[in-house]
Amino acid sequence: MIDLRELYQDIILDHGRHPRNFRMIEHPTHTAKGHNPLCGDRVTVYLTMDGDRINDVAFQGRGCAISTAAASLMTEVLKGKTEEQARELFAHFHARVTGGAETLLSEPLAEEMERLEPLTGVKAYPARVKCATLSWHALEAALKGNGATVKTE
Ligand code: ZN
């Protein structure tokens, strides 16, 4: 039997130490910064959109293992998705980590949501929810294109 909690912890530690897509995109079509004053996490999300599809997504920043792992996993699931799919995933993920009402996900997104599952353990630690959602809030701001720094407070 695999201990899921242990497996999830391993995934978070791995992505926290070796974040994927941790780089700057030189000429992003969309970008935004996020700041979580509660924990001190800072993240910049970069996107290259082709129409409404996410061609490339990357991030840089400094923060705790959870915020880094969350941003890393986010970039992995978002590549190739449409803006609408990205919003759908965030809505669902947000509900999972805050204990809110879950939205229905269409099939390809349900698979991607499984990859975000390790992060849903933060539900038990309200202060860490902001760490896990920071990069998603920055993504949302980037898609809106207002270029401002979003704060989780
Ligand atoms: Zn944090």
Image (cartoon, helix red, strand yellow):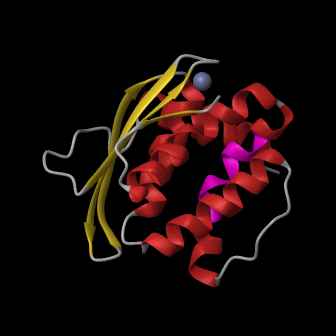
Q: Kindly indicate the quadrant of the structure image that contains residue 119.
A: top right
Q: Kindly indicate the quadrant of the structure image that contains residue 52.
A: bottom left
Image height check: is 66 above or below 112? Answer: above
Q: Who's the residue at 55% across and 26% down the image? A: 65
Q: Who's the residue at 42% across and 52% down the image? A: 75
Main SS class of the magenta portion in the image: helix
Image height check: is 34 above or below 52? Answer: above
Which x, y percent locates residue 59? 35, 40
Which x, y percent locates residue 104? 75, 76
Q: Who's the residue at 51% across and 23% down the image? A: 41
Residue 116: in magenta span: yes
Viewer-side residue, 75 vs 16: 75
Which residue ends up furthest to the bottom in the rendered image? Answer: 107
Q: Who's the residue at 69% across and 76% down the image? A: 105
Q: Is residue 48 left or right of residue 18?
A: left
Ligand 1 is in which quadrant of the figure? top right
Q: Is residue 131 left or right of residue 85?
A: right
Which x, y percent locates residue 113? 64, 63
Q: Is residue 49 left or right of residue 45?
A: left
Which x, y percent locates residue 1? 82, 51
- Give the total number of marks visible in the rendering: 0
Quarter of the image that includes the C terminus: top right
Question: Where does the magenta region start and end?
Answer: 113-121
Residue 89: in magenta span: no
